[in-house]
Amino acid sequence: MRRSFALLAIAAVIGCGPKRPPVVSTTSPGGGAAAGTHTANTSAPMPDAAPLPVDSGPDVQPLREDATTGSEILGGESGEGGPLADVYFDFNLASLSEAALATLAKHAQWLKQNSNTKATIEGHCDQRGTTEYNLALGDQRARAVYDELIAKGVDASRLNAISLGKERPLDAGNSEAAWAKNRRAHFVVSR
């Protein structure tokens, strides 16, 4: 069993595309590591020019002022009840595509403009593979998104990265189209 797990871990590392910088846990005010959070080493922030408004559309939605959590925050129509669109991944990969990077640039801008919000990034996988493998891959996907948002200037204290593996599929179908919908990083925004 240990050998199987070790081989699975090695396969996960090899199959996940280019290496990213090491991830360091954030520390809570008490000095201990905050559970479930991850940060990347970043240099001092560069002074920004006045922020440009984020276009509404399929990637980001307006924030309702009277909302407090979950789907209430959504100001427009969206299939998953949140203002930030999901980011999708190729099979067995945690690397960010050009489309994902473009979406995350908008997400970072939106998060900076809505500084009273926090976001949990959920890493999801399709139904293929073991539970353990998909939890590890979901974690790598959530961390890739987390690291990219931090690199784009979002404060790490406002983000949390978790893995749900294959446990909460968006589409329970057994086809490539269904599986593609499930290989994603999903955002849960709260105040």
Image (cartoon, helix red, strand yellow):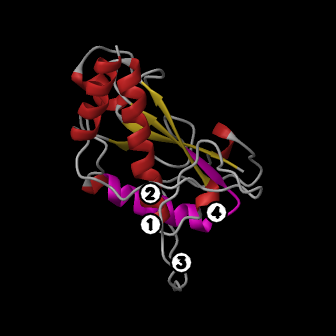
Q: Residues within 10 Å of mark 4 (few under 14, many from 20)?
A: few
For badge 1, the amino acid type reads: Ala
- Mark nearer the N terminus (2 vs 3): 3
Secondary structure under tag 2 reads helix
Can residue 123 be seen in the rendering of this structure? yes
Can residue 128 be seen in the rendering of this structure? no
Q: Position of residue 142 (x, y in %)?
A: 45, 43
- Mark nearer the N terminus (4 vs 2): 4
Horizontal arrangement in the rendering, residue 33 relative to residue 128 (left or right): right
Along the line of sight, the residue nearer the viewer: 100 or 16: 16
Residue located beneath label 1 in the image = 151
- Quadrant location of residue 3? top left
- Image label count: 4
Q: Are marks 2 and 1 in contact (CB under 8 Å)?
A: yes
Q: Which residues are magenta?
A: 100-120
For badge 4, the amino acid type reads: Asn
Depicted 188 relative to depicted 150: above or below? above
Depicted 130 relative to depicted 18: above or below? above
Secondary structure under tag 1 reads helix
Question: Could you tell me which residue is drawn at 64 percent across and 52 percent down?
Answer: 118
Residue located beneath label 4 in the image = 114
Residue located beneath label 2 in the image = 147
- Mark nearer the N terminus (1 vs 3): 3
Q: Residues within 10 Å of mark 2 (few under 14, many from 20)?
A: many
